[in-house]
Image: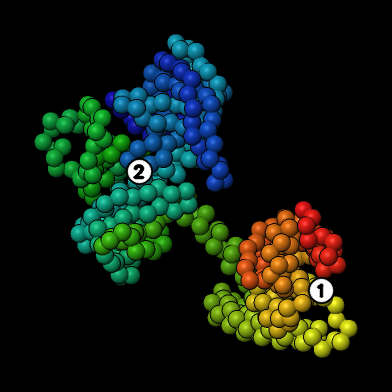
Amino acid sequence: MAFFCQTDSYATELLTEVTSCSPAQLKTENAGKKETLSGYNVILKDTVLFPEGGGQPDDRGFIGDVPVHRVTRQGPDAVHFVSSPLDPGSQVLVRIDWSRRFDHMQQHSGQHLITAIADSLYGFKTTSWELGRQRSSIELDTATMTNHQVEAVEQLVNEKIRQRVPVIVRVISTEDPEFNQVRSRGLPDDHAGPVRIIDIEGVDANMCCGTHVANLSDLQVIKILGTEKGKKNKTNLIFIAGERVLKYAARSYSVEKSLTALLKNGPEEHIEAVEKLQKSVKSLQKNNLTLLRDLAVLSAQSFKNNPDRSKLFSLHRKEGDNEFMNIIANEIGAEDTVVFLTVGDEKTCGLFLLSGPPEIIDQVGPRAANILDGKGAGKKGRFQGKANKMSQRGEVERLLREVLNGSALKEE
């Protein structure tokens, strides 16, 4: 059975009937967080919403005023997941999110066209493809693809778009002799009945269940962004089509404009300017590390040269790292001195280090980590880790003084 959305890909609504509605759950992922939604699976007599398949994501839309969160195919049926129940037998108006649908049509038909041209020019077969949210990729059965080949494919696909080549959808039986002649990556195991042929006139004929433009002119333009190394002996060709090209150009211009203002030069000089900045940053980072190491040594020596030094050396520095703290601890190295060092934001998070007599550090280290709301580990008189409440470092100092005075070694 062909759904109404497959019969007329440009239709935006359909009056139909609810045939069943049953409680269901939908597993989703929102901003990287997985969650399970409770709702209902609704089957309609026919639908204008495309269920995912053929590499194309499903449509979104409404059944009446109820939003549709997912559409999947189960055998001959399209199953619509909704949050509110619908009465079986009721008449409903199904409306589509046209912007999403037309975008998918452009990318899917663009894939068919690129696949056909890459095959006809160089014999590169398409083994799979993915319609992404911002860009799409076609996996080609070739280990490499030269820039010249990419440019030739892009030039010819856009020539076909300018020629306004019709795209015709035909339905044939699996018994039809043409069935074994058209390009296909195979039918689903549960497929039954006739099959759809997407025929780009004079260019390609391919079995497909997806929604497509009626004329290549509706693709507007195709831009091949480049290639990436794919699976073994495969190449992924990255492309965008139609409205995505316009959005890509707008984003690129906005970035170019911002870089021009920041770098104080023209677009053709951006790369050179950024390379100079990177070299400067690396040089500054190297100099900063050298200065930090020198400062660490000087801080330790200053403490060691003080005849009235206490048994506790405590220091916080916003700029620093583990190496900075370890240099100080190594330089002081006195068996009768407890060293407490922290680096990072003094109010939020950072790193800490404790060193000194093992019998003290082994007991105080975990307690200090707990006070700082952090985690750490250590051995042989040294304990270090991450702190999430650097504002509590004063409490750690208080604990250390009590320990050194012999009053808190057994406290929890």
Q: Amino acid at mark 1?
A: Leu
Label 2 close to label 1 by CB (< 8 Å): no
Query: Image quarter for residue 120?
Result: bottom left
**In front: mark 2 or mark 1?**
1
Residue at the location (45% across, 38% down)?
A: 101
- Give the mark nearer the N terminus: 2 vs 1: 2
User: Image height check: is 233 above or below 12?
Assistant: below
Residue at the location (85% across, 61% down)?
A: 407
Viewed as shown, does residue 337 lie left or right of 243?
A: right
Residue at the location (45% across, 26% down)?
A: 80
Q: CA distance from mark 2 to mark 1?
A: 66 Å
Residue 385 in view here: yes
Viewed as shown, does residue 237 lie left or right of 274?
A: left
Residue extending furthest toward the left: 177
**Residue ID for mark 2:** 55
Q: Amino acid at mark 2?
A: Gly
The answer to which of 42 and 298 lies nearer the viewer is 298
The answer to which of 31 and 403 lies nearer the viewer is 403
Residue at the location (35% across, 37% down)?
A: 53
Q: Residues within 10 Å of mark 2 (few under 14, many from 20)?
A: some
Percent position of residue 337, x then y:
77, 76
Percent position of residue 37, x then y:
54, 30
